[in-house]
Amino acid sequence: MTCIDTLLTGDAGNVRALEARPQFQLLRHDVSQPLELGGPVDAVLHFASPASPVDYAAHPIETLEVGTLGTRNLLELAQARGAVFLLASTSEVYGDPLVHPQPETYWGNVNPIGPRGVYDEAKRAAEAFTMAYHRRHGLRTRIARIFNTFGPRMRSNDGRAVPNFITQALAGKALTVYGDGSQTRSLCYVDDLIEGVMRLLACDEPGPVNLGNPQELTMLELARLVKELTGSRSEIAFSPLPVDDPRQRQPDITRARELLEWEPRVAPREGLARTIDWFRSTGR
Ligand SMILES: NC(=O)c1ccc[n+]([C@@H]2O[C@H](COP(=O)([O-])OP(=O)(O)OC[C@H]3O[C@@H](n4cnc5c(N)ncnc54)[C@H](O)[C@@H]3O)[C@@H](O)[C@H]2O)c1
């Protein structure tokens, strides 16, 4: 298995344990640049992209490039080697959704020129590229529309609500909730997500499939839950809502249930407890 990463927002430490295995290698390479790879290729899983609003605001051009040029390079690799191609797409393709919960048939409500546009539109282009290779070349494709996912090994400073709240709570600092905290997200634990991705890879659905946990939480509920699970006495502080922040998010996972016989098994409370343990034990 070859893991290709620029380490732009990643950390080589996350795969260090895997590097001891002879069949694993980490290759530092920008997938937006052309790519040569020896040996047989069974599957190309395209997960490369800055993924948090803080990261794609810091790397807007790289984000657009990896969704477009990077996707094209990896589709070419899959096609040349007869491999199956899986795209890690996102619920951000739905933008600030006018349909709730969001089924795969919903086309979305995205601001192309707002600060989130670089990520949302790159992923929408990545989906369009993927379907074009499927239709034009008969490439075996899979598109995972991933909703908010969390777990151990997230960066404490990546700006997403879960690591933000946990690191603030563990440091005894105020938990920063944007707006009045009534905006919702659906949080999927990473083990569930990976199980869904592996099942999607093994099925033969070329189009998008939502993967996420339909259990919706307001950001204020999430902050209170993190406080409770960490036993923190931190205050909850309120900051202005970021531009184009989606009001609500909840996947309709009917398609994943039917096609993959998949649904999340780890409740947000349990996943958060495991994640808090990891942040505590590593001192991140
Ligand atoms: N975590 C979520 O909630 C979520 C939700 C929807 C979609 N996704 C998608 O899943 C994927 C992984 O997200 P994550 O949360 O693990 O983020 P992450 O930042 O931990 O992982 C992304 C990785 O891609 C690498 N990368 C970025 N640009 C690259 C390039 N041009 N070439 C090679 N490597 C590059 C980064 O260094 C990083 O290791 C992303 O494509 C993201 O859009 C994640």
Image (cartoon, grey):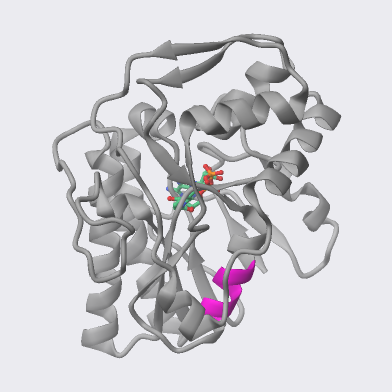
Please say if 33 is above or below 203.
above
State the residue at coordinates (50%, 16%).
176
Q: Is residue 99 magenta?
A: no
Residue name at image x 64 percent, y 17 percent: 168
Q: Name the image quarter holding the C terminus.
A: top right
Residue 76 visible in image: yes
x and y, in percent, of residue 209 in the image: 40, 72
- Provide the residue span drawn in magenta: 195-201
Q: Is residue 77 shown above or below 20?
A: below
Q: Is residue 6 left or right of residue 33?
A: right
Q: Residue at x 60, y 64 (%)?
A: 264
Quarter of the figure with residue 80: bottom left
In this rendering, the answer to whether 222 lies above or below 97 is: above
- Depth check: give the residue in front, 154 or 268: 268
Visible residue check, residue 156:
no
* Quarter of the image that includes the N terminus: bottom right
Q: Quick check: is 196 in the magenta stretch? A: yes
Asked whether 196 or 58 is in front, the reply is: 196
Q: Position of residue 166 (x, y in %)?
A: 66, 26
Residue 143: image quadrant is bottom left
Relative placement, left or right, of 137 versus 205 is left
Give the dominant element type of the magenta stretch: helix, strand or loop.
helix
- Rendered view: 21 above or below 203: above
Q: Residue at x 73, y 50 (%)?
A: 15
- Residue 107 lies, in percent from the top left, at 19, 62
> What x and y, as percent, mark residue 273?
75, 40
User: Disc count in the image?
Assistant: 0
